[in-house]
Image: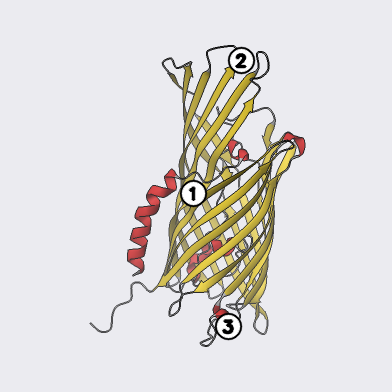
Amino acid sequence: MIKKIILSACLLISFVSFAQQGTASPYSFYGIGDVKFKGTIENRSMAGVSVEQDSIHLNVENPASYASLIQTTFTVGGTYGTSKLKSENAQASTTRSTFDYLLLGIPMGKFGVGFGLIPVSSVGYKIRNDQSDDINGKSSQYEGKGGVNKVFLALAYKIKPNWNIGADMQYNFGKIETTGIKAITGVESGTREINTSTLSGTNFNIGTMYQTKIYKKTELFTSLAYTFGSNLNSETERTIQVDGDAAIVTDTPDSVLKMSNKVTIGAGIGEARKWLVGSSLAFQGAGDFKNSYNTTDNVRYEKYTKYAIGGYYLPNYTSFTSYFSRITYRAGFKYEKIGLVVNNESIKDVGVSVGAGFPITGSFSSVNFGIEYGKKGTVSANLVQENYINFSLSFSFNDKWFVKNKFN
């Protein structure tokens, strides 16, 4: 059954993932756009905390996790989000629906394999500056769409019953298109500039997870992941059109966008399949995302940092009399400096999240739901503040593969 579900989902999502516009944030103008992927919905409901060696849920943040799977696990998730954008003198509202990930993990004895498709970042903005009422006033309009996706292959190994190691290789690819229109009051001719940038590159991630009992049923969980610095190659084609005349197409010099090394450390205490309280810290060096179409004097990039605390509670996963006792309840809090500085103002993303995992009776499969409320940016320094609410839904299917039937 799970194989049919995977095939149907792959056919649908392979089309949808490249056609979607996953953000309406004006901050997606910079770099490679608004970084969207924050982990699976199970982890995002705990603000990204993912330190436990889970046997039935996937953890993409640390490739070592795949060695703990006991069944083949397939999961697919998506999000419906609303945002209120406001500045000192204006405000607007937006909505969007996005595909978040398609993942598959397969246990193979002491080994575990994982692969999947993930939209990493998204560009989606419309910015207008209208001063056409003034004499010789200028008006301009900027629009962007596209983003970066990745496919990955991971391999993990269980050194000891409580110690895993793993690594994955990722191929990043995507396309970003920006359009700028400029006009001057009293001048008939206006200009339109379109930049289409094709991005590609690879990077690698390694990780380890360790757990040990510290008191009766209480265990200590730890996680460490390291992402190597990498490059994204950018090939940009520029099209310029003046007042409807024939377009002039030029190839701009190729750019190399640099992503720095990233370290993610996590720890928590709890009882497996019962409760967990944990925290995670993530640090990444300042990237270099200057490209021919999004370089401005008032923008620079700084180190990325994230602090998160979260956990879950599962009353009784073996209960036969109460379905609600088998529901997993999750919550978390996060604080992020996203690595972008505009007008000398560091852009921050602060949010809280809650969620629940509803088991499908008769299996280890589940339906997971999460809500995230947060704030990104500020109205200070002539910037925009985003207040957002994201409603996320995922389906996690579990089944045994490669098991020979005893009876025909």
- Amino acid tagged 1: Pro
**In the rendered image of this protein, does residue 34 appear above or below residue 290?**
below
Point out residue 7 in the picture as x, y percentages from the top left corner: 33, 60
- Residue most extreme to the left: 408
The N terminus is located in which quarter? bottom left
In the rendered image, which residue does mark 1 sit on?
119
Point out residue 390 in the picture as x, y percentages from the top left corner: 59, 55
Point out residue 162 in the picture as x, y percentages from the top left corner: 56, 74
Label 1: few (<14), some (14–19) or many (≥20) C-alpha neighbours in 10 Å: many
Point out residue 183 in the picture as x, y percentages from the top left corner: 57, 18
Query: What's the CA distance linking mark 2 and mark 1?
Result: 41 Å
Disc 1, SS: strand
Q: Is residue 398 left or right of residue 315?
A: left
Residue occupying image coordinates x 64% and y 28%: 296
**In the rendered image of this protein, does residue 278 appear above or below residue 261?**
below
- Amino acid tagged 3: Asn
The answer to whether residue 315 shows anywhere in this view is: yes
In the rendered image, which residue does mark 2 sit on?
185
User: In this orientation, which residue lies closer to the viewer: 337 or 381?
Assistant: 381
Tag shown at residue 316 = 3
Query: What's the CA distance linking mark 3 and mark 2?
Result: 69 Å
The C terminus is located in which quarter? bottom left
